[in-house]
Image (cartoon, rainbow, N blue to C red):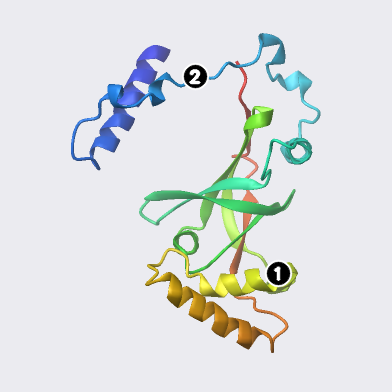
Amino acid sequence: MIVSSVQNLWKLCAGVRRLSTTGPIRMADSSVAQLRVSYRDKGDVLLEDNLESKNPHQMFSIWFKKASERDDVRQPNAACLATATKSGIPSARFVLLKAFGESGYTFFTNSESRKGREIEENPVAALTIYWDALDRSVRIEGAVEKIDETESTEYFDTRPRSSQIGAHVSRQSTVISSRESLSKQNEKLEVEFRRKTSAQTVLLERLQNNSQNDGILARAE
C-alpha cells in the first residue's frame, strides 16, 4: 500500500510537471532521483518521550536556539512562506522570521508583492522552517493579520537607512526596466530621506498560528 501510494504520487507530480514542458521527462536526463542521504541510527530517532517540552511553541524556541548556536546554520530564521490566491493557486518563497511566541510568528513583506496581494485576498498562510544540520523542521499554519502601526514603525526604524531606502526602491513582483533606473531612484530617495527620521512603508504581517494545525516535524529514520 505504501509503495503504491508513493508511485501514484510520483506519477501525479510528474504529470503536473509535464504540463509546463515541451517534451517528455526522462529520468536518465538527471541524477536527482539517485540522490540519497544517510540518515542517523535508530537510536537517534526523535520520540515524543524525549522532547524537552510538549508545548510546540517552547519546543520551537529550544530548537531555534540550538540552530542559532551552530556555525553550519547560516540563517536559522529563514522560513518558506506559502500563500494562495482566493481561487487556491499557491505560491511560496523564503522570508525571514523576525519574532515568535505564543501570540504568533512575525515576518515582514511588501504589501505590493505577490505574497502581500495574496495575503490581502486570502489571509491564511503556512510557514516551514528547516534546519538541515539539526534534522529538524517546523510547520506553522494559520490566519495572517497585520501588526499594529507602532510595532511596524519601531521595527522599520531599527533597519539600516540603506535597507529602508531599498524597501522603497524595490517594488517586489514587478518588472524592472533596468538596473540604472533602480540606481537613480535609490539616489533620489537618499537625498529625500536625509530630511526624515523614518521611511516606513513596508507591510508587516503576523502569522497567527492555529493551535489545531500546529505541527512540529523532525526527520528521523
Which is more toward the observer, 200 or 83? 200
Residue 161 picture quarter: bottom right
Residue 160's disc number? 1
Q: Which of marks 2 and 1 is nearer the N terminus?
A: 2
Q: Is residue 25 above or below residue 3?
A: below
Residue 148 picture quarter: bottom right
Which amino acid is tagged 2? Arg
Residue 36's disc number? 2
The answer to whether 92 appears left or right of 210 in the picture is left
Which amino acid is tagged 1? Pro
Residue at point 39%, 22% (across, down): 33
Q: What element carries label 1?
A: loop
Residue at point 69%, 80% (across, down): 198
Name the quadrant of the C terminus: top right
Residue at point 25%, 29% (across, down): 25
**Residue 174 location (% of width, % of height):** 40, 67
Number of marks in the rendered image: 2
| Whether label 2 touches label 1, CB < 8 Å | no
Q: Is residue 11 visible?
A: yes
Q: Is mark 2 on a helix, strand or loop?
A: loop
Q: How crowded is mark 1: few (under 14 residues within 10 Å), some or many (20 or more)?
A: few
**Residue 56 location (% of width, % of height):** 72, 37
